[in-house]
Amino acid sequence: MKNTFNHLIDTASLSLTEIDELLRLALDIKKSPQTYVGACNGKIMATLFYEPSTRTMMSFQSAMLRLDGGVIGFDNPSGSSVTKGESLKDTAKVVSSYSDLLVIRAPWEGAAKAAALTADCPVINAGDGGHLHPTQTLTDLATLSAELGRLNNLTIGLCGDLKYGRTTHSLVKTLSKYKGNRFVLISDKNFTLPDYIKNHIAATDCTFTESDSLGDALPQLDVLYMTRTQRERLAVGENPTTFVLTPQLMSQGKKTLAVLHPLPRVDEISPLVDDDPRALYFKQANYGMYVRMSLIVTLLNITKSHPPVPLLNGKTYDGISCLNPKCVTNPAYNNVNLPRSFLRTGNTYECEYCSHPRAGRGD
Amino acid sequence: MKNTFNHLIDTASLSLTEIDELLRLALDIKKSPQTYVGACNGKIMATLFYEPSTRTMMSFQSAMLRLDGGVIGFDNPSGSSVTKGESLKDTAKVVSSYSDLLVIRAPWEGAAKAAALTADCPVINAGDGGHLHPTQTLTDLATLSAELGRLNNLTIGLCGDLKYGRTTHSLVKTLSKYKGNRFVLISDKNFTLPDYIKNHIAATDCTFTESDSLGDALPQLDVLYMTRTQRERLAVGENPTTFVLTPQLMSQGKKTLAVLHPLPRVDEISPLVDDDPRALYFKQANYGMYVRMSLIVTLLNITKSHPPVPLLNGKTYDGISCLNPKCVTNPAYNNVNLPRSFLRTGNTYECEYCSHPRAGRGD
Amino acid sequence: MKNTFNHLIDTASLSLTEIDELLRLALDIKKSPQTYVGACNGKIMATLFYEPSTRTMMSFQSAMLRLDGGVIGFDNPSGSSVTKGESLKDTAKVVSSYSDLLVIRAPWEGAAKAAALTADCPVINAGDGGHLHPTQTLTDLATLSAELGRLNNLTIGLCGDLKYGRTTHSLVKTLSKYKGNRFVLISDKNFTLPDYIKNHIAATDCTFTESDSLGDALPQLDVLYMTRTQRERLAVGENPTTFVLTPQLMSQGKKTLAVLHPLPRVDEISPLVDDDPRALYFKQANYGMYVRMSLIVTLLNITKSHPPVPLLNGKTYDGISCLNPKCVTNPAYNNVNLPRSFLRTGNTYECEYCSHPRAGRGD
């Protein structure tokens, strides 16, 4: 198993210093874009989008093109070799022989890590099902850092479907690394933040409270992070309440409130809020492009000098396989030769691809 | 409502001086392409094609790449955020934060104007349903200007489906701005040019006659503009006659006749005509690329110096909404927050997006 | 009928000197890529993929971008003008007016040659149905040449579906041009190499034997060329045996054995073979990119100085049309105005598009 490069699979693998450096560089590129034109001259980025995501794809493409690099790839799974039965490992191996950087988006949880195991170049996770979406988290952090001037001692409301919303999970986990943040979890009772993430907060210097009323929660917030209900990820019969941010509600917020949203929005923010200077979600999309420029430049450079971080740190256990049907190791997805790898804690085996904790002997 | 940029939504908004300048620049680029390499270095164009149009898309892409700019975008609506319920306004807002120029093609009439209302960069209309296709019109004009040396005092035959053919509508309206042009409208009786365009000609210095025989009309023509029946735009049961240009018919034309066609052709021009030097339709496609280069350079430059042209000049009227089912303001298309805007003349309210004149109180 | 350019439709039209020069240049670019950056500055390549092939498309795109050229095109037939009824000839004519090089992949046999008849620039065949795939063959040759140091006096095993596998057909025909090669044809009895290719070998300095056992054949081989069963090309009811290369079988091979595969693989090579240094299939993919760079540079340059090679050398015969339903001249594919052209030998008329030999008067 080779791993000669540094990848971005999960923000959890980044130290605070590394995050801060990525954000600093993103803001410097935004300030002086001309300085960075040509930074990727002669380099090729491949975007392997096994699931459509126009916005994320265009953000990455624009980032690479502005650095004078080239872009190849597909945005449409039916046009890919996967339809000829090829494994993700083979695709990653071959496409990385054409390119200097792979950006992968896939519906299978753990897909980017699986690809990184064989790729001959750095891999960026651009979303692996409902699991992780680290460049969105870095985008959120860059927006808060630039617009509020700090990432600590904030009261952060997260509103909407907190059960399935991977962007909120990842944001909470990362902001918990900073001191004194307080999370207000605003959701309907059947769509609360999963316990394992609440436990994660509890183990840090940060705190959380829960609420089922956006109106009640709003006045105390420094940040309001609204999310779309990801209907494509709901189980049959699930139908969460949509919380809607209106100008009336905005009138109860602080003057310095920052409203974020990973976009696309559907109904959860009234368009009448758009002209409020506290509505930062469109600016946020723009920060996302600079974060991706920063990440591309960084991964192409550190690869030269830094020792690689190992991708798999666990073990294979006889008779243990991941029980998450959406995991990239599910045999249905044609990746049967991926090495299984679990982090064991007592009787719990956490899959190192999809982070699923239920895997257990005899389950 | 912001409008900080100049866009190309409709050739009707261009003065003759502006048109002539765009054509002059296009022909200069064609003559000295090397002078313009690098003109868009570091700039990004996004092509948002909600409806496939390979030819138009490739023409725009090639234009931008030849100017050393970068291209992002999609050509396939199923891969777009629209499938996640996003409004056109939001898409335009976000994508324009990644790019310096938006090129929009959509099946909804008025879509490009709607996008321009929120975009943070210039917008080019690359076809909005059956409504407008201004870069095709500029292509037609560039071809005539370069090949015939003038845009006035021409006898211009337009042949085929003149009822739905937006390219002929737009060409007639624009050529009517020049002096002494005479239009010969060749179509079957159920597919004649709409009255409002005939009225448009009648209000100018130009004239028209109608014919249902290509053979009768041909000998007098300086220009013959053939069109494809746009089957995708016909109502159920409509089945227009296809007029077919053959070598035999060509033998009756002037030696200086110019045959144009917006392409793709189906059956309406025999391939045996292709080698006739008067068949200019393939040259015309090539002029189209230079026209788009001219337009891209112009829009990226004038944005810096010229005051913006307002996009909406009408008013919202209580109880008045557009009755055109294909209008971008139709609630079915998810753009419910577009400001309605109508130009009123007596009891007629013309929608400022799709130009539909039937909107009226109590209709 | 014009043919002002040199194209790559079939490796059969290349002399050994031309092949060797293409391979030499490919390996030189691989060795000194920096020397060739900028070689295609200001040039545009259009990729017309009427049939998806992610891998081939990305290889071509990366090749052109690394030479600093631009890329336009489509990878998805539903988005093409073909759906509006346009003939391949018209598409080739128009797209070549936007670009400097066309790369065509299509399910119709003879499609690239048909396109080359009207294109105003060089055309590369990137696969025309089950017929030809010349850049794959050049890739195979480059791999062998670089890794083994010679293309003659080799014992070459070809394994899998040899009936439909166009890559094996083309490789056999081309390697037969070199002296002293010996082919070992490993297939199940219903999927043997077609007679006309065996006859081709018999007419050269090379020889062949047949086998239905990979294990029996392996020890003697210098090269083992494994292939995927192309299920998309099988007739109903056909179900060839899959030969599977395993580490156990590899242990019987020579130390200098070279294992190639055009990829994507499905089951025919165990992933456990991947780490064997004799497994060259991933390296082979990388050579493919350099071969395409070599070809692009060569075609764009020789066009200036070399006289064009005629595309059609045969004649039209009254009452003779090609009987291959997959031939690009089949009227079902809308290319009715292609000139029919056959090479006659006695009563056999070989179609010059698809090479089908069965065409005959009164068949």
Image (cartoon, coloured by chain):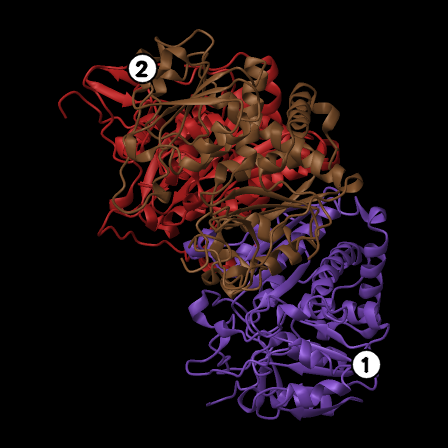
Chain colours: A brown, B red, C purple
Left or right, residue C313 beside residue B201: right
Residue B163 position, x and y percent, is 31, 41
C82, A240: nearer the viewer: A240
Callout 1 environment at 10 Å: few (<14), some (14 to 19), or many (20+)? Answer: some
C339, B123: nearer the viewer: B123
Residue position for label 1: C178
Per the image, label 1 sits on a secondary structure element best described as loop
Distance CA(mark 1)–CA(mark 2)? 82 Å
Q: Seen from this angle, which residue lies furthest top?
A: A255
A313, B60: nearer the viewer: A313
Residue B340 position, x and y percent, is 30, 20
Callout 2 environment at 10 Å: few (<14), some (14 to 19), or many (20+)? Answer: few
Q: Is residue A220 above or below residue C223?
A: above
Residue drawn at the location 52% of the way across and 65% of the way down = A84
B343, C292: nearer the viewer: C292
Q: Is residue B195 above or below residue C255?
A: above
Left or right, residue A69 beside residue B357: right
Question: Residue A151 falls in which quadrant of the image?
Answer: top right
Residue drawn at the location 67% of the way across and 39% of the way down = B66
Q: Quadrant of the N terminus of chain A?
A: bottom right
For residue A216, the mark is: 2
Subunit bearing disc 2: A
Residue A58 position, x and y percent, is 54, 37
Query: Which amino acid is tagged 2?
Result: Asp
